[in-house]
Image (tube, rainbow, N blue to C red):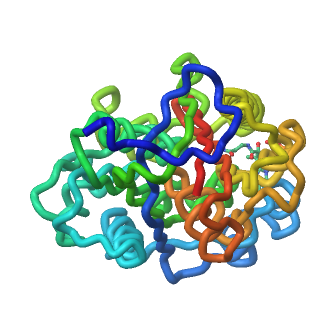
């Protein structure tokens, strides 16, 4: 079997010892809820202003899911769009990975619920928790399963209903986040490339910078945990900002180095959409030109694990990348976690 695998890698300068990866991203899809909440809407809820939010974050509006629309619903809609575009049926899918920090329930996994909603067979399904970095973690895991020969077709979804863990009275955090989902289908295809390489990392020493303190085994739900607001997302914005820039730049540079690529050879940089100032700082330090960098943050805010998944789908639909182009994705999130991936689209 392995002798049939001859990937047509288009990169001439791959580092010595690099193993070609016979795995392709067949298709992508995304879904965002209908309800739009603008900065002006938030002005009526907390002491903030469109001017503050725009200048500090770049966000103009975000989407919020309806009360009866759960993370699994957003995920299933994004997945169905990817399946339609790729001509993939439910019974072809061997594994579903859902990256999320807002699962429908702590268990069973949201991936199991998605399996039912998209009409997949009794394939393997699990959730992955790497916060905003989850989608890149998911792509790499999917690729490993495919390369090992365990599975042929893997569905990776980043999906969040962050609106359920946001304190809508806390102006420090409520202006930053939104709901949505993005999906990618990976398949073993000897003649094409998906992820060329990826870098993943984490630093649990900084876990407290961004967390939801209650609801797990450390602090189960009590009347007191609820009244203290411990079930909401908490963040040290300034420290998170600094860590994000440093980690994203290092991860992206490492990925480029491994492929022997210069940033100018990347058609589209897709950074985690958390804050325009983070994106600008990372782009500057990488030497990326503004026209190389894909941004949809102003429309959706930070959708955590869904962020780069939605952005990838939109970059493709808008014609910003064509088959054969090189994409650099770079992410950062709670954990702390980070990751980057060079993809040949
Ligand atoms: N509207 C108006 N004022 C606000 C506000 C809001 N929505 N949120 C905070 N402020 C106030 C603060 O209370 C503070 O007031 P004070 O000086 O009287 O205490 C002031 O604005 C400045 O706050 P500061 O924290 O210095 O702002 P900042 O420039 O660091 O920007 C963030 C704050 C959160 C936008 C920024 O730190 C950030 O984006 N951090 C990274 C967040 C992130 O991306 N997290 C997810 C990573 S995956």
Q: Nearer the viewer, residue 208 or 200?
A: 200
Q: Position of residue 277 (x, y in %)?
A: 83, 49
Residue furthest bottom as drawn: 34
Residue at horizontal 25 percent and vertical 39 percent from the top? 1
Residue at horizontal 54 percent and vertical 30 percent from the top? 200
Q: Nearer the viewer, residue 3 or 242?
A: 3
Quarter location, residue 92: bottom left
Please determine whether, in this image, residue 32 is positioned above or below residue 184.
below
Q: On the picture, is 179 further left or further right than 125?
A: right
Quarter location, residue 83: bottom left
Please determine whether, in this image, residue 340 is positioned above or below residue 321.
above
Residue furthest top as drawn: 205
Q: Position of residue 169 (x, y in %)?
A: 60, 58
Please determine whether, in this image, residue 25 is positioned above or below residue 32.
above
Q: Position of residue 136 (x, y in %)?
A: 51, 44
Residue at horizontal 60 percent and vertical 76 percent from the top? 317
The image quadrant where one finds the C terminus is bottom right
């Amino acid at each position: 079997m392995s002798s049939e695998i001859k990937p047509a890698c288009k990169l001439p300068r791959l580092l010595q010892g690099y193993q070609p990866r016979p795995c392709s991203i067949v298709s992508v899809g995304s879904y965002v809820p209908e309800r739009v909440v603008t900065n002006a809407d938030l002005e009526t809820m907390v002491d903030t202003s469109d001017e503050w939010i725009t200048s500090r974050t770049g966000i103009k509006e975000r989407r919020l899911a309806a009360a009866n629309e759960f993370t699994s619903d957003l995920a299933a809609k994004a997945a169905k769009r990817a399946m339609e575009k790729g001509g993939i049926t439910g019974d072809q899918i061997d594994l579903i990975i859902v990256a999320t920090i807002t699962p429908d329930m702590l268990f069973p996994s949201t991936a199991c619920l998605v399996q039912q909603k998209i009409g997949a067979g009794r394939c393997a399904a699990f959730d992955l928790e790497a916060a905003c970095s989850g989608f890149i973690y998911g792509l790499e895991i999917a690729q490993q399963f495919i390369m090992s020969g365990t599975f042929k077709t893997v569905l990776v979804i980043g999906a969040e209903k962050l609106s359920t863990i946001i304190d809508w009275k806390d102006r420090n955090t409520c202006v930053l986040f939104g709901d949505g989902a993005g999906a990618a289908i990976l398949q073993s295809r000897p003649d094409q490339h998906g992820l060329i390489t990826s870098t993943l990392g984490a630093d649990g020493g900084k876990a407290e910078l961004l967390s939801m303190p209650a609801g797990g085994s450390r602090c189960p739900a009590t009347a007191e945990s609820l009244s203290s607001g411990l079930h909401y997302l908490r963040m040290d914005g300034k420290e998170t900002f600094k860590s994000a820039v440093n980690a994203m730049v290092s991860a992206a540079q490492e990925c480029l180095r491994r492929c022997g690529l210069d940033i100018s050879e990347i058609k589209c940089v897709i950074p985690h959409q958390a804050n325009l100032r983070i994106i600008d700082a990372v782009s500057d330090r990488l030497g990326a030109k503004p026209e190389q960098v894909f941004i949809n943050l102003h429309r959706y805010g930070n959708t955590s694990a869904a962020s780069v998944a939605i952005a990838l789908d939109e970059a493709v639909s808008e014609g910003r990348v064509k088959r054969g182009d090189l994409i650099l994705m770079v992410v950062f999130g709670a954990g702390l976690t980070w990751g980057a991936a060079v993809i040949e689209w």
